[in-house]
Image (spheres, rainbow, N blue to C red):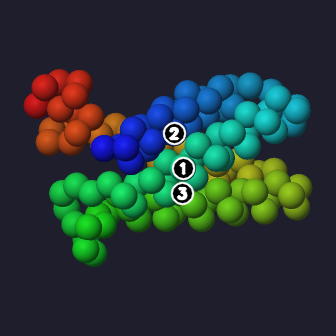
Amino acid sequence: MVAVWIHLVAALWALVFGAVQLLSAKGSRRHRWLGWSWVLAMVVTAVSSFWLSGGLALLGPFSVIHLLSVWTLVCLVISMLAVRRRRLDTHRNFLVGAYLGLVGAGLGTLAPGRLISGWLFGA
């Protein structure tokens, strides 16, 4: 259950502050600081997902959603390399993609039979 809470807190941090990042000015010290905290939250979210299991197992306890976690980690690495090389379009595109993946995964938790759905809707 600890892994669930770590995953949930990190995902909520990434969801809220990812939206703030998308809507705020880019390139400032605040943007960089908040961006690093967002990347850290995304790493924690993705890595902690490997301690969670659910239905639709694909390989052992891992499901299709775990592929999204792997892809998220790849996106984060690519975007960090891109910003260091001043390839800001690549940086932005991979981070927006990672954020949209987080939103999609979050919406997936509302499906019947999922833990969060049960908490929220009693199903």
Earlier sequence position, callout 1 versus callout 3: 1
Please identify, in this view, whether the residue under mark 1 or under mark 3 is nearer the observer.
1
Cα gap from disc 2 to disc 1, whole angstroms: 6 Å
Left or right of 105 in this view: 56: left
Identify which residue, 29 or 6, lies in the foreground. 6
Earlier sequence position, callout 2 versus callout 3: 2
Left or right of 57 in this view: 14: right
- x and y, in percent, of residue 105 in the image: 38, 45
Please identify, in this view, whether the residue under mark 2 or under mark 3 is nearer the observer.
2
- Amino acid type for the residue under numbered disc 2: Ala
Identify which residue, 114 or 1, lies in the foreground. 1
Q: Residue at x 54, y 49 (%)?
A: 44
- According to the picture, the residue beneath numbered tag 3 turns out to be 72
Identify which residue, 84 or 54, lies in the foreground. 54
Q: Residue at x 38, y 48 (%)?
A: 3
Q: Residues within 10 Å of mark 2 (few under 14, many from 20)?
A: many
Cα gap from disc 2 to disc 3, whole angstroms: 14 Å
- According to the picture, the residue beneath numbered tag 2 turns out to be 10
Do the residues bearing badges 2 and 1 touch, measured as CB atoms within 8 Å?
A: yes
Cα gap from disc 1 to disc 3, whole angstroms: 11 Å
